[in-house]
Image (cartoon, rainbow, N blue to C red):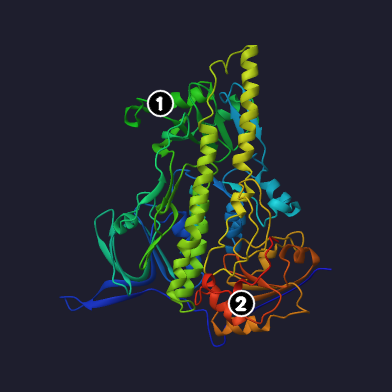
Amino acid sequence: MLRIRQWTRRAANRLTLVRLPYYISAIAENGRYAVTEEAYDVAIAGGGPFGLMLANELGRRGISAVIFDEKPSTAVNPQANATQARTMEHYRRLGFAEEIRALGLPGDFPTDIAYFTRYCRHELARFRLPSAKEAREKVTTLSGSWSAAELPHRVSQKFVEQVLRRHAEALDAISVNYGWRISGFDDNGEGVVVKATRTEDGATRSVRCNYLIGGDGAKSFVRKTLGIRYEGDGGAVRDFFGGRMFALYLRCPQFYDVVPFPPAWMNVTFNCDRRAFMAAVDGKGEFAFHTQLRDGEKDEDISDEQALAMFQSAVGYPVQAEILSRGTWMAGYALVAERYQVGRVLLGGDAVHLFTPAGGLGYNTAIDDAVNLGWKLAAVIKGKAPPSLLATYEIERRPVAVRNTGFAKQFAESIGSYTPKTALEDDSETGTALRKEAGGYLEAHGRAEFNIPGITFGARYDPSPVICSEPLAPNADLPNVYNPTAAPGGRAPHLWLDNRVSLYDRFGFEWTLLRLQPFSNRGGKFIEAAANAGMDLTVLDVDSNDILGLYHQPLILIRPDQVVAWRGNDDIDAAHIIDIVTGRLDAREDGKANQQAEVTL
């Protein structure tokens, strides 16, 4: 029998307050008051997925934040096209996963990855994935590696940013400012003074904040000002996915009329003439088309007519199309910043990691960055944790960036270094045999790149000083295999409580004490210690053999980012453990918290 009980305990005499921005005025020469400086808890450079997600995390915790982004608005080009399941779980936690899933492709549009010689000629391989409608129906039936509150969704970043912005702007404590760039900052040790400049006319604003967050992309002004460099592979050269890429955002409804194969979300060409990949943006005729420039080809020398000819070559038919925008970008990067923090300035998103977009990992890694940093910043600013807690952001997230850029590099090598043979497109026995051979390789590659529960759910923070880690038997970190474990340092194992209610839906927005055998240990000392520390703690009772089989201990302390911080069978050291997970003590220097089982469970 499944029994569930849930309640939230907040520290006595503490209210959830919204820390609104305020303004510092001075008397001008005309005798009137004029605003000379604004004050926020946090200033964020960059209004992309990282910055907007961070603003949502902070604003919902009552932390005031101001975003500056030099673009006139959110993205107008598709950019990233894959939202992984873990990112969708974060959107579910914030209440807008369904809003995201309704965007992009029609609900019944296949999200397959299909490989062709040319889109109209020969289909070589296809890795089938569920449509948005099928994902909603299928998610509650899955277990093991794909036991999740949400499945992946194929949607262009431009749609996602609009939702993130709308929800951020609905928060009283958040100010979103496009058309402004951060042009200078000074960290004096007690706060940061930020200068923002309007791109339209050069007008300036001065903002005083506790912390500045640089989420201003690959060319980050904040990172460069701090003198922080990228480390890693800065320019792999391959037949494909290694060099300068030419991108077209175009409209071609005729595509679906002339292509004789079922539609797919991701369409990849494999031939000796024009290799490309192309994501369906709306399922009606808008596409994000990318091809690698050959030696001697330069973007500035390519007319729109020539650009369309590139697209038509990949299609294998003289389709009519309209170019909506065009540009170039460099494939072959696997770079991670050497540091994530200097004083009161921290970095996230593309400002600290650059991917070749194989596997769609860059934007999703950035969302996880924001979630990790958000609750920690809020705890420090509210005085519920010491500033040293912020150092664990780099300790936890930088190894994940190194891991994820490494996986993306493997995928890029797999597809980019596999080259087509000359007779591949011939209508001959040789051509048929070569297409069968290529199809086998590409089908296996597609499965390896796009069926990645290990990457999606398997990142771990075991060495973190705010995780009560257990000695674990070595386990290979594989992209395609995820074995759920409640060992502290990883995502809490997921379970459906009934047909539509996820265990995650019952977790608190902040901390959760999961009690699996409440009749044997009620965890009263944890509840008391959390209240004394000012922690908002949700107590969740679930009496089920299925979930006990996943978590193995009756008491589990789960962080705001749904990562297991500690598990055990009693609450004797509750106050000590609360000090560790909030950064008051360092678990790496403390043996008491690590007296756990020496096996992987």
Numbered badge on residue 537:
2
First in sequence, mark 1 or 2: give its number: 1
133 to 447, vertically: above or below: below
Quadrant of the frame with the C terminus:
bottom right
Residue 556 in the image: state x and y as whole percent.
67, 71
Judge from the rendering whether residue 546 lies leftward or rightward of residue 423; answer left or right.
Answer: right
Q: Which residue type does callout 2 highlight?
A: Leu
Furthest residue in direction top, as rendered: 428
Instruction: Tell me which residue sits at (42%, 54%) in the image.
Output: 352
Numbered badge on residue 294:
1
Q: Is mark 1 on a helix, strand or loop?
A: loop
Query: Disc 1 versus disc 2: distance between alpha carbons?
Result: 57 Å
Tags 1 and 2 touching, CB below 8 Å: no
Q: Which residue type does callout 1 highlight?
A: Arg
Furthest residue in direction left, as rendered: 29
Numbered badge on residue 454:
none
Residue 219 in the image: state x and y as whole percent.
35, 49
Please tell me how many numbered marks the rendered image carries.
Answer: 2
